[in-house]
Image (spheres, rainbow, N blue to C red):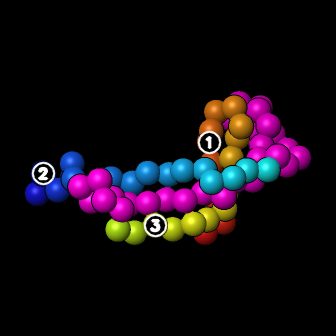
Amino acid sequence: MACFCFLVDQTRKVRSFKPVAGSCSRCGGGASVANMRTSTRFCYVPFYWKSWKAITCTFCGAVLKSYR
């Protein structure tokens, strides 16, 4: 059971982004709309991925709002 935790992981990549009006509520940096892709891997082989949009901070990288 403990070995299973180390064999499965998720990676989140930004595919493209576009600046929008607004600022981050955490650090005050600028905001952008990003097309994100989350992929779940087992032994470094991706077997599931999902594309979604999110409003992210350009300075701290926090996801402010997600559209799944």
User: Can residue 64 be seen by looking at this rendering?
Assistant: no
* First along the sequence among labels 3 and 1: 3
Cα distance between the residues tagged 3 and 1: 21 Å
Residue indicated by mark 1: 62
SS for callout 3: strand
Residue indicated by mark 2: 2
- Which residue: 12% across, 51% down? 2
SS for callout 2: helix
Tell me the amino acid under the disc marked 3.
Trp
- Which residue: 54% across, 50% down? 13
Quarter-wise, where is residue 31 in the image?
top right
Q: Label for residue 40?
A: none
The magenta span reads: 19-46
Q: Is residue 26 above or below residue 7?
A: above
* First along the sequence among labels 3 and 2: 2
Tell me the amino acid under the disc marked 2.
Ala
Residue indicated by mark 3: 49
- Which residue: 68% across, 47% down? 56
Quarter-wise, where is residue 28 in the image?
top right
Main secondary structure along the magenta-highlighted residues: strand
Q: Residues within 10 Å of mark 2 (few under 14, many from 20)?
A: few
